[in-house]
Each structure stands twice: as C-alpha cells, then as structure tokens.
Image (spheres, rainbow, N blue to C red):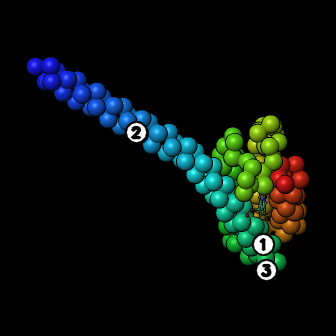
Amino acid sequence: MMSIVYNFCNVFTTGFSVMRLFILFITIAISFSVVSNATNNAADVINERKNFFKKSQQDIKGLYASIRSGNLDEIKTYSMSLAEWAAVMPEYFPEGSGGGLSDALEKIWEDFHGFKKAAKKFELAALSVVEAANLSDKDAIMAAASTVGDSCKSCHRKFKN
Ligand code: HEC
C-alpha cells in the first residue's frame, strides 16, 4: 500500500515537473518568437523602405528624362509614382526602426510631425508636376520638378545620416 501511494506520488510529481518543463518550454518558445518577430519586422520595414527609396531614385531619373524628351504621359506616371510613395512614407518609419542597417536619424521620431511635413512637401511637389503636365506647361513642369528634387535633399539633410 505504501509503495502504491509512493508510486502514485512519484508519477504525480514527475508528471507535474514534465508539465512544468513543457510550460516553460512553450513560454520560452513564445517569447523567443515574439522577440525574433520584432527584430524581423524592424529589419523588414528598413528593407522595404530602402527599396521604395531606390525606386523613387529611378522614378526621379525617369521624370527628368521624360521632361527632356517632352513625354507628358511619362512625366505624369513618374510623378504619380513619387506622390504615392510620399503619401505612405511615414508609415514605413515605425518608432524604433532606426539604427543598425538604417541611415534614419533618431530625429525622425523626436520630431515625427516635422518628418511627416517633409514627406507632405515631397508629395505636394510631385503632384504639382502632374498639374503642370496636365497644362502642358513646360516651364511649370521644370520648376515643379526641381521642387521635388529639393524636397528629397532637404529631408535628407534633416533626417538622414
Ligand atoms: C521625408 C523625408 C524624405 C524625403 C522627402 C526623401 N527621403 Fe530619401 N531617405 C529618407 C530617409 C530617412 C532615408 C534613410 C532610410 C533608412 O536607411 O532607413 C532615406 C534614404 C534614401 C535612399 C537610400 C536608400 C538605401 O538603399 O539605403 C535613397 C536613394 C533616397 N532616400 C532617395 C530619395 C529621393 C530620390 C527622394 C525624392 C524623390 C527622397 N529620397 C525623398 C528620407 C527622405
């Protein structure tokens, strides 16, 4: 009888500690995946925005080339693509996504309002190229395109390494 009780207790305590180990394991697994997700997300968003920035550089080259060749449709396509990126850019700068592989300055999050204003300036400049293209006004197109270039540079000076 004593040994049955003893065995029962033994099974119970062993079972209990296996259970605890299991819970501990699950807890570690979950917290590990949460941490690695957070790191992956930060790295992902940096890569995503860098790709958008690279594309915007191609777009602005395309814009200048289409101004030289006088292709209004292309001018509008490149400017719209720039304006669309400008409109979502701040969403690609979640808090804490600086440092490491990123050239984003901490100032972005210290002055997110200012950063959003700089993105808005870029968006409006790109849209003003579309407007000028709709009017087929070459001088206005050139003037507007140069404000787009200025908006890139002035944001970089303030918010980028
Ligand atoms: C509102 C601010 C802002 C505007 C406007 C802006 N940029 Fe940037 N840009 C940044 C920041 C911040 C980074 C750094 C991103 C990072 O490394 O995480 C960057 C990075 C870049 C990069 C480097 C990408 C890489 O591979 O590391 C290029 C190229 C670039 N921008 C081009 C442009 C061009 C072209 C324009 C205008 C058509 C523009 N940017 C407008 C803020 C801006």
Residue at horizontal 63 percent and vertical 58 percent from the top: 48
Foreground mark, 3 or 2?
Answer: 2
* Residue 28, image x, y percentages: 47, 39
Q: Is residue 50 above or below residue 36?
A: below
N-terminal of the pair, mark 3 or mark 2, is 2
CB contact under 8 Å: marks 3 and 1? no
Residue type, mark 3 in image? Ser
User: Which of the two residues, 43 or 132, is positioned nearer the viewer here?
Assistant: 43
Q: Mark 1 highlights which residue? A: 61
Residue type, mark 2 in image? Ile
* Residue 94, image x, y percentages: 66, 43
Q: Is residue 48 left or right of residue 70?
A: left
Labels in figure, total: 3
Task: Give the label on residue 26, or none.
Answer: 2
* Residue 139, image x, y percentages: 88, 67
Residue at horizontal 85 percent and vertical 61 percent from the top: 149
Dividing the image into 4 quarters, which one contains the N terminus?
top left
